[in-house]
Amino acid sequence: MKILVVLALFLGLAACQNNKPEKSLKSNHDLAALQTEKSVVTTQKFFDFENYKTGQLPEDWSQFTTGKDPETKWQIIQDQNNKVLAQLSNKHPNYHFNIAIYNDLSAKNVDLTVRFKAIKGHMDQGGGLVWRFKDPNNYYVVRANPLEDNVVLYKVENGIRSDLPLVGKGKTYGINVGKLGKDWNHLRLVAQNKLFTVYLNGKKLFEVKDQSFTNKGKTGLWTKADAVTYFDNFQINVLK
């Protein structure tokens, strides 16, 4: 009898544990704290944006645009019970890039992760990660677009954006992925010297090799044209 009681208690406890809700990515960082394989992290910076004032761009960030239209609108907003950094301006031509850059760190080799949620946009949606940012006309960017359901890595050099060929596949205009939709997705970029590795929602997508920009630069976030996008849990790991 005692054995049956103990067994019942054990099974009940196991069922309760299995039914526990998963912790939110906001609270435990999960994918935002992915380890960098075979690399040494020298500096870490994590942004959940909770300590910033709403209605304005964080004081340690700057906003820029690539293109003729200088207007962009990055600010902290409340998304239900969660603060996010959002790009809210939606009145831009197709060749217009909105950029938000963290001011206080410059690096060459980085492991970047971010959560993003596409809110709206007719010409474009979604957004991406910027690294080795020299100025608004010279940087690398990888972006995920829910309108096209693809992920593409580009260089922006002298104001001209060019998609880069994939290792082993050539010039493919990035890679098609499953439906990104309107939910949160995770984008990750690991830059080690000339090798760039891209992940989406924990899955490795492709690699790119390029040496257009070999010096240190700033990192940040990016949207295109009229894409209104929310970003959260942005993490910068500086690699040795």
Image (tube, helix red, strand yellow):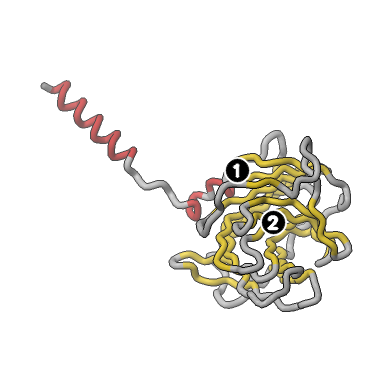
| Residue drawn at 57 percent across, 68 percent down | 120
| Residue drawn at 61 percent across, 54 percent down | 114
Name the spot of residue 76 as percent of width and height, x first.
58, 71
What is the quadrant of residue 166 in the picture? top right
Of the pair 146 and 139, the residue shown nearer to us: 146
Q: Quadrant of the C terminus?
A: top right
Of the pair 181 and 193, the residue shown nearer to us: 181
Name the spot of residue 149 as percent of width and height, x first.
61, 53
User: Is any part of residue 45 visible from this angle?
Assistant: no
Q: Which residue is mark 2?
A: 129
What is the quadrant of residue 52 in the picture? bottom right
Q: Mark 2: which amino acid?
A: Leu
Residue 40 to residue 48: above or below: above
Q: Which residue is mark 1?
A: 34
Q: Contact, CB < 8 Å: mark 1 with mark 2?
A: no
The label shown at residue 98 is none
